[in-house]
Each structure stands twice: as C-alpha cells, then as structure tokens.
Amino acid sequence: MNPSLLCLNAGLVSYKEGLSLQKQARAMVESGQYSGVLLLLEHHPVITVGRSGGRENLVVSFSELQAAGVEFIESDRGGNVTCHNPGQLVGYPVIDLSRWQQDVHWYVNQLEEVLIRTLKTYDIIAGRKAQYTGVWVGNRKIAAIGVSVRHWITGHGFALNVQNDLNLFRAIVPCGIQEFGVTNMEKQGALISLQEVARDLANQFSEVLVASLAVEARGEKHGKA
C-alpha cells in the first residue's frame, strides 16, 4: 500500500503561522494519520536566515526592512538567506522519511525533481546546478530549497517563484551566491495562477514520491483519499 499524503492549501500566512502549521502537520504524521502532509501557501514579505548563517548576505539595514514592512527571521532550516513574498509558492512537506528512504540527500533530490517536472508542465526547462541545491533556469534560480529533519520527519521545504515581485531579492545576496541571479515563472513566459501551479505541483509530488493524495483547503475536514 502506498504511503498516504495530505496536501493542505493554507493561503497567505505569516512566516510564524507557517511554523505553527508545520507543528500541527507533524502531530498528524507522528500520530500515523498520514505518512506525510504537504503544506502549500504564500508568505507575507519576509527574509529568513538558515542554520548555515547568512546575515552577512543582507545588503540593507534592518530599519529599511522594517520601513518596507518586511520581517527578518532566523530559521532552523538548512541553507543560507532567502526571501518569501506573495506570488511565491512555498511548500512545507512534513513527511516521515521512514515510509520512503531515510536519506536526506535522496529527499532533497526528490524535491528538486518535483519542481523540475512541475515547471516542465509549463514549458519551462529547468534543472539542477552542480554544488548548489535548488532548481535553476540557466544561471537564474527559480526555486530555493532549505529543509530540516528531526527523527526522520521533515520540516521546511521549498519556495517556487511564480509571479512574485523579485525586487525583494535585491535586499540580499540570495543563498549567498553572488554570481547568479533569480527569476520566476512569469518572467519565463508562464502567465498562470499560483493556485493552478499548486494543484499541478501537488500531483507531481504524489507521483514522484509514489503516494496516495488527498487535497484539502485550510479549514476543511481532513479525510484520506
């Protein structure tokens, strides 16, 4: 029997609310209700720094961020500094890797594969770049990945630039990589709604991880497919 996966569409939330939703999802996974929960959402403007640091890659002052209404948060995810804002599809897969493979490198590779396949649906040819995590279109990053794993249950995840304002990335050196830039699906010619991208990504996620999928909107009653 395939692992069971719930995709929960949570809408536009703060970064802290996203952390709270991950805790709720983890409780569902730990209880055995699902093998994994895929949270799909958008964040209000925020810059986050991962466990490997990244404050040095912030190129504006905290007062400038505050004036622009942008939060700054230190996170327990992997990776360096990144941005989230509306129009970017953020995915937090909270899954029990013991139901798949207890291998973090394998897991990150699967996330990249999901994103690459999703982008291909919209005729965007994306791929991996040696020595760097995430998904790239040429020399521009279109999706960032930063995960955490505790007792083989995952947290945090990925951020796919769909139609977000890329000007926020000027406040940082994205992921600490100076020589490359960023892009989004809109700039690559895909004029598509974030909701449609979320639907297609959820389907790709279940296919790549070979899991049965149930999809719910936030506030709906959860039920297995």
Image: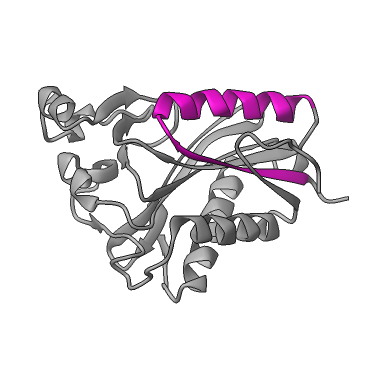
Relative to residue 50, is residue 218 drawn left or right?
right
Query: 60 or 13: nearer the eye?
Result: 13
Bounds of the magenta span?
4-31
- The residue sitting at 19% across, 40% down in the picture is 172
Give me the residue at 57% from left, 62% from top. 200
Image spot of residue 113 (x, y percent): 55, 60
Image: 24 above or below 176: above
Provide residue 201's location: percent of width, then percent of height.
56, 58
**Residue 115 at what x, y percent from top left?**
50, 59
Visible in this render: residue 151?
no
In the image, taking residue 6 as reference, residue 107 lies left or right, namely left
Give the color scheme: rainbow, by chain, secondary structure or one colour.
one colour
- Nearest the viewer among 175 and 165 is 165
**Does the segment drawn in magenta span residue 58?**
no
Residue at image point 57% right, 29% down: 22
| Left or right relative to 145: residue 108 | right
Going by the image, does 128 lie left or right of 209? left
Q: Residue at x 19, y 35 (%)?
A: 57
Q: Where, by quadrant of the figure, is residue 27 drawn?
A: top right
Number of marks present in the image shown:
0
Residue 149 appears at what percent x and percent y?
Answer: 57, 30
Q: Decide which of 61, 66 is in the foreground and name it.
A: 66
Verify whether residue 8 appears in magenta.
yes
Q: Is residue 221 visible?
A: yes
> Which quadrant holds residue 191?
bottom left
| Relative height, residue 150 to residue 222 (above, below) | above
